[in-house]
Image: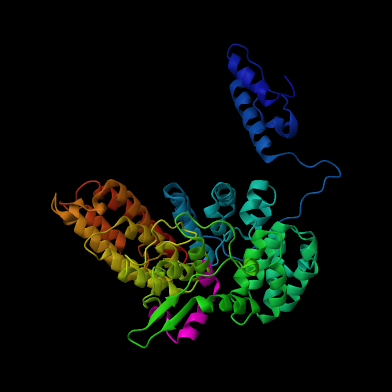
C-alpha cells in the first residue's frame, strides 16, 4: 500500500489488520516525508502511527508552494504575559460566569498584562459570541492577539473598537481604513490638535455615509469648545437622525452656544419663581402651541405619549432642552433647592419630567441626586403615573448618573431598611464593584440576619430568603464584594454557610459566593 490517506487508514482499521495485515509504506500529503519512521514489523503499530502522522500534518497545514509569500509576523509584545497560575484561574472563571471572566480580564489589562498565546483563540471565540466580553478581551490581546484576530471575520469584531492607530500609519488610515480605525485616527488627532481634527472631518463631511457621520461626530466631545459650534450647528440639519442627536448632545455641553440661548429663551416664559423665602414657588405655564423652529433644536415631533396632553408634553420637552446650569443661575438656588420648590397647578410632574430627562442626557449628578431625593419626599405629587420612559426616566437611570461612592451610599441606605425590595436589589446589582467596605458590610449583615432568622419570622420570609433572590444575590455579590484587603469575605461566607442554623438554599449559595471571591483574590494576588 502506498500514498494512503486518513480515510484509507480508517477503512483498514475497520476491516482489521489481524484479518488482512498490510504494512503502510507511503502516506499522502506532507506526512509522506516521514513515512520511513513507520514500523515494518507490526501492522497494527504501523496503522496507528500513520494515523498520528496524518492527523498532525492536517493540523499543521501545508508548506507554501513556490511563489507563495508568508504573512508578516506579529510585532513583538512588550507587555508581560500573565503568570501561568493566573492563566489557569482565567480558565476556571470561564466555567463560572462570563461576567467574572470579564472582570478578571479587565483587571489584567489594567495591570498591563497580556493573555498567553494558547488562550488567544479561546478568548477570541468567547468574545465573538458575547459582546460583553469584547472590551475586556481586546485589552489583553497584545500585538499577537490582534494579528491573529485579523485572519477571521468573527474575531475581527472583537478588536473593532475605536483604538488609537499606530502613528506610522499616517493619514492613509483616514482614507482607506475601516470605520473603527478611522474613528481611532480622528480621536488620536483630536487629542493632539482639536482644530485639525474638526477641519479634517468637515472637509469630507458631504461624502461620508450617514452611519459614518453618526460614528465620527461624537469624537468631537474630546476637547469640545466654542470653535466647534459652527460645525455642530450645520450638523443639526443633517438628514440622519443619529447625526442630529449627536450634534444636540454636543451643543448642550456648550452653555454659551446659540443653541443654548434658543433653548433657554423658549423655557424662560414657561417657568418663573414667585414669592419670597420660605414661601417661594414655581409658576408653570403651558406653551401656546408648537414651535416649528424648535424641532430643529431637538423638540420631538409627533403625538405625545398616551395620557399626556400635547401642551404638557411640549412643556416637558422645552424644559428638558435647557442646560441645567441655567436654572441655578436664574433662580439663584442649588439644584436641591430648586426641585424642592412647589409647582403651581397640576404641572409639577411635567416640570420634573423635563428635569429628569435633562439630568440623564447631560449626566448631571447634582441634579440626579436632588431629583431622587425630591421624589422620595413627594411620592404622590411627583410620580411617573402612566408615563413611558421617554417622558419619565426611571430612578435607575438617574442613579446611573451618580458617582460610584454616591451610588454605593444610596444602595447601603436602601438595604438597611427593614424591608428589602426588588428595586433595592436591582440597584445593588447595578452598583459598580468592587463595592466599598461600607456597602459590603451592609450586604454581609443582611445575609447574617436572614441565615440566623427563625423559621416563619419576617426576616426569614423576606424576598432575600427566596431561592430566586438567593441565586441573583450570589452572582452579584460574588463579583463585587471586595476580594483584596485585610478582611477575607470568602472565609466569612464559608463560616456563615457552615453555621448550624443556616437554612436551605443558603449553604450552597454562600459556598458558591465564597469560591468565586477566593478565585478573584487568588487572581489579583498573581497579577499584583
Does the magenta segment cover residue 327?
Answer: yes
- Image side of residue 341 versus residue 102, left or right: left
Identity of the residue drawn at 75% across and 76% down: 196
Residue 494 located left or right of residue 333: left
Above or below, 277 relative to 434: below
**Magenta span: helix, strand or loop, mainly?**
helix
Q: Is 68 left, or right, of 361 in this rendering?
A: right
Residue 170, horizontal then vertical, whole percent:
78, 68
Residue 402, image x, y percentages: 43, 71
Considering every residue shown, the one lying at the far top of the view is 19
Query: What residue span does the magenta drawing correspond to?
Result: 317-337
Scheme of image coloration:
rainbow
Tell me the quadrant of the picture where the N terminus can be found: top right
Extreme residue in the right direction: 67
Camera-side residue of 334 and 429 = 334
In the rendered image, residue 310, in percent from the top left (x then y), is placed at: 51, 61
* Residue situated in front as seen by the camera: 472 or 396: 396
Q: Can residue 223 be seen in this view?
A: no
Amino acid at each position: 500500500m502506498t500514498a494512503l490517506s486518513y480515510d484509507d487508514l480508517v477503512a483498514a482499521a475497520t476491516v482489521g489488520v489481524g484479518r488482512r495485515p498490510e504494512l503502510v509504506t507511503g502516506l499522502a500529503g506532507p506526512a509522506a516525508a516521514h513515512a520511513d519512521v513507520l514500523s515494518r514489523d507490526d501492522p497494527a503499530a504501523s496503522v496507528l502511527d500513520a494515523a498520528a502522522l496524518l492527523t498532525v500534518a492536517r493540523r499543521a497545514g501545508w508548506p507554501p508552494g513556490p511563489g507563495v509569500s508568508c504573512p508578516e509576523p506579529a510585532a513583538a509584545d512588550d507587555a508581560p504575559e500573565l503568570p501561568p497560575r493566573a492563566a489557569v484561574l482565567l480558565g476556571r472563571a470561564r466555567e463560572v460566569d462570563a461576567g467574572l471572566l470579564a472582570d478578571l480580564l479587565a483587571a489584567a489589562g489594567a495591570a498591563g498584562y497580556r493573555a498567553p498565546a494558547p488562550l488567544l483563540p479561546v478568548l477570541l471565540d468567547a468574545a465573538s459570541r458575547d459582546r460583553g466580553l469584547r472590551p475586556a478581551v481586546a485589552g489583553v490581546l497584545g500585538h499577537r492577539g490582534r494579528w491573529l484576530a485579523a485572519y477571521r471575520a468573527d474575531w475581527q469584531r472583537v478588536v473593532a473598537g475605536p483604538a488609537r492607530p499606530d502613528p506610522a500609519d499616517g493619514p492613509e488610515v483616514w482614507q482607506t481604513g475601516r470605520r473603527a480605525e478611522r474613528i481611532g485616527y480622528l480621536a488620536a488627532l483630536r487629542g493632539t490638535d482639536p482644530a485639525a481634527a474638526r477641519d479634517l472631518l468637515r472637509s469630507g463631511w458631504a461624502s461620508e455615509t450617514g452611519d459614518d457621520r453618526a460614528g465620527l461626530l461624537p469624537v468631537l466631545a474630546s476637547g469640545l469648545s466654542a470653535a466647534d459650534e459652527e460645525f455642530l450647528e450645520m450638523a443639526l440639519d443633517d438628514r440622519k437622525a443619529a447625526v442630529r442627536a449627536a450634534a444636540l448632545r454636543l451643543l448642550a455641553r456648550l452653555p454659551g452656544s446659540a443653541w443654548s440661548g434658543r433653548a433657554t429663551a423658549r423655557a424662560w416664559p414657561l417657568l418663573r419663581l414667585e414669592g419670597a423665602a420660605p414661601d417661594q414657588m414655581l409658576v408653570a405655564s403651558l406653551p401656546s402651541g408648537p414651535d416649528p423652529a424648535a424641532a430643529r433644536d431637538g423638540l420631538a415631533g409627533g403625538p405625545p405619549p398616551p395620557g399626556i396632553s400635547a401642551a404638557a408634553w411640549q412643556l416637558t420637552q422645552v424644559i428638558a432642552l435647557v442646560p441645567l446650569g441655567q436654572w441655578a443661575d436664574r433662580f439663584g438656588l442649588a439644584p436641591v433647592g430648586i426641585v424642592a420648590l412647589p409647582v403651581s397647578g397640576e404641572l409639577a410632574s411635567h416640570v420634573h419630567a423635563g428635569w429628569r430627562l435633562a439630568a440623564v442626557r447631560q449626566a448631571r449628578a447634582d441634579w440626579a441626586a436632588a431629583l431622587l431625593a425630591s421624589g422620595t419626599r413627594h411620592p404622590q405629587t411627583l410620580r411617573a403615573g402612566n408615563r413611558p420612559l421617554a417622558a419619565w426616566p426611571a430612578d435607575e437611570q438617574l442613579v446611573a448618573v451618580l458617582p460610584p461612592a454616591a451610588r454605593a451610599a444610596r444602595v447601603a441606605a436602601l438595604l438597611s431598611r427593614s424591608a428589602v425590595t426588588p428595586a433595592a436589589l436591582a440597584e445593588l446589582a447595578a452598583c459598580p464593584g468592587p463595592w466599598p467596605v461600607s456597602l459590603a458590610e451592609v450586604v454581609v449583615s443582611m445575609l447574617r440576619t436572614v441565615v440566623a432568622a427563625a423559621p416563619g419570622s419576617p426576616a426569614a420570609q423576606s424576598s432575600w430568603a427566596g431561592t430566586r433572590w438567593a441565586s441573583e444575590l450570589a452572582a452579584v455579590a460574588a463579583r463585587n464584594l471586595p476580594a483584596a484587603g485585610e478582611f477575607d469575605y470568602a472565609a466569612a461566607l464559608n463560616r456563615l454557610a457552615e453555621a448550624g442554623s443556616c437554612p436551605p438554599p443558603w449553604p450552597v449559595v454562600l459556598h458558591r459566593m465564597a469560591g468565586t471571591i477566593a478565585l478573584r483574590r487568588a487572581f489579583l494576588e498573581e497579577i499584583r
